[in-house]
Image: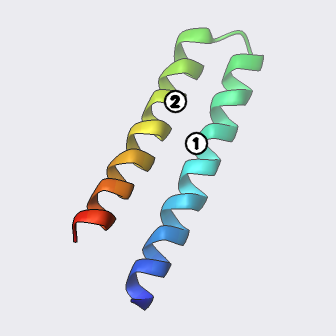
Amino acid sequence: MIEKIIAIAVILVCTVRVIGYGAYTLKDKNTVGGVGLFVIAFLVAMSSVYFFLVS
C-alpha cells in the first residue's frame, strides 16, 4: 500500500513539472513542443491510473 502512495506521489510531481514546462514552452512561442508536452503528461497520467486500477 505504501509503495502505491509513493509511486502516485512521484508520478504526480513529475506530471505537474511536465505541465509547467509545457506552459513555459507555449509562452515561448513553441506551440508544437508545448502541445507535445501536454500530450505526454496526459498519457503518463492515464497509463498510471490504468496500471494502478488493474494491479
Q: Nearer the viewer, residue 6 or 33?
A: 6
| Image quarter of the C terminus | bottom left
Q: Residue at x 63, y 49 (%)?
A: 16
Q: Secondary structure at mark 2?
A: helix
Q: Amino acid at mark 1?
A: Val
Rendered view: 1 above or below 52: below
Q: Quadrant of residue 7?
A: bottom left
| Colouring convention used in this rendered image of the protein | rainbow
Mark 1 lies on residue? 18
Direction from residue 54 to residue 36 in the image, left or right: right
Direction from residue 35 to residue 45 in the image, left or right: left
Q: Position of residue 1 (x, y in %)?
A: 39, 89
The image's mark for residue 37 is: 2
The image's mark for residue 28 is: none
Q: Position of residue 42 (x, y in %)?
A: 47, 37
Q: Residue at x 30, y 64 (%)?
A: 53
Q: Residue at x 55, y 55 (%)?
A: 14
Q: Amino acid at mark 2?
A: Leu
